[in-house]
Amino acid sequence: MPELPEVETIVRTLSPALLGRNILAVAVRWPGCLHGISARSFTQHLRGASIANITRRGKFLQFALSRKGRSRHMLLHLRMSGRLELRRKTEPEATHDRLIFKLNNGMCLCFNDTRKFGRVYLVSSPSEVTDSLGPEPLSRELSEKVFFNMIRLKNAAIKPLLLNQTFLAGVGNIYADESLWRAGIHPLRRSAGLSRPEVRRLLRAIRFTLSQAIRFHGTDAGDGVVDFGRYKPMVYGQTDAPCPRCRKAIRRMVVAQRGTHYCPYCQKARP
DNA sequence: CAAACTCCCTGTTAGC
DNA sequence: TGCTAACAGGGAGTTT
């Protein structure tokens, strides 16, 4: 499940291969992935466009496209099982290919998405899609002070708050658990009840975890659905394994309908 | 305002 | 062995 580090990895991997490339044609295999645009219109707008830039905002991939002097932006959200693959034009289509972009270098960019949760947007400005997102966790603008004020303004359980993309962009289930463990904060702690030092630790933990994961090219879920890098989670998916810090058994519980992993010793429910 | 549901999907897995 | 039901999960939308 691609979160910020995985999407960042995709951007960095694809950029050298795609920048400046021309899109010769687009095949829409499953129109349901297109948000607010018909397959016909989508195809027409993209044919002949060149890829000017590839960036990330939260968990969104942003393709800046240029065609006839006009710029448009294609945004992709991979959700659970979405992936982008570069294949030779001669290779056969894969089972769950939803979109296929034929490029002018003998390659195809394929949007493959087993569970059909992924969405693709075509807009004049990326902000039309990303406007509601919270700040980037790794950005300079998100100072400790700003983060503290954001957190104290809410009174919600801290883990669901971290997962809320309008609060903070890019953190998903894996890195929320990892960051809370690193900061020594229980997933159910109330945000308004966190002390200044705790919030400081939390922001540092989030940044450390995301940076580390980017360095390792993300986490491989191991389910064969989306394979990424070799970041090894400390607690996520480690139920019953010893906590790397104190050796007590990692526990799993459900918080906001999400599997949540934590150390009962390092992350106390009450401060 | 916060939290709990529901839905969208399909591959995997537990249970019979 | 072969079937079915439960489950996972990001996010939007709805209800409590």
Image (cartoon, coloured by chain):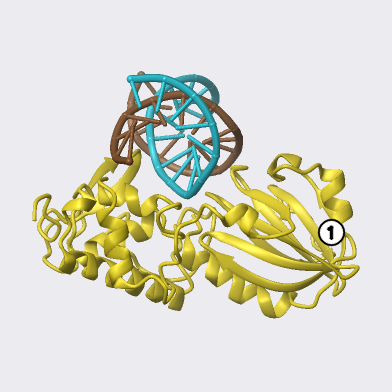
Chain colours: A yellow, B brown, C cyan
Mark 1 surroundings within 10 Å by alpha-carbon count, few (fewer than 14), some (14 through 19), many (20 or more)? many
Q: Secondary structure at mark 1?
A: helix
Depth order, front residue of A53/A151 = A151
- Asked if residue A208 is positioned above or below residue A134 in the image, the reply reads below
Tally of numbered discs: 1
- Residue appearing at x 19%, y 55% in the figure: A250
**Which chain's residue wears label 1?**
A
- Residue appearing at x 20%, y 52% in the figure: A192
Q: Which residue is mark 1?
A: A46
- Residue appearing at x 17%, y 57% in the figure: A194
| Horizontal side of residue C14 vs A109, given as left or right | left
x then y, percent, for residue A219:
44, 65
| Horizontal side of residue A264 vs B2, given as left or right | left
Residue A234 can be seen in this image: no
Classify the position of the C terminus of chain A by image quarter. Answer: bottom left
x then y, percent, for residue A30:
75, 42
x then y, percent, for residue A36:
72, 42
Depth order, front residue of A27/A50 = A50
- Asked if residue A216 is positioned above or below residue A102 in the image, the reply reads below
x then y, percent, for residue A88:
79, 68
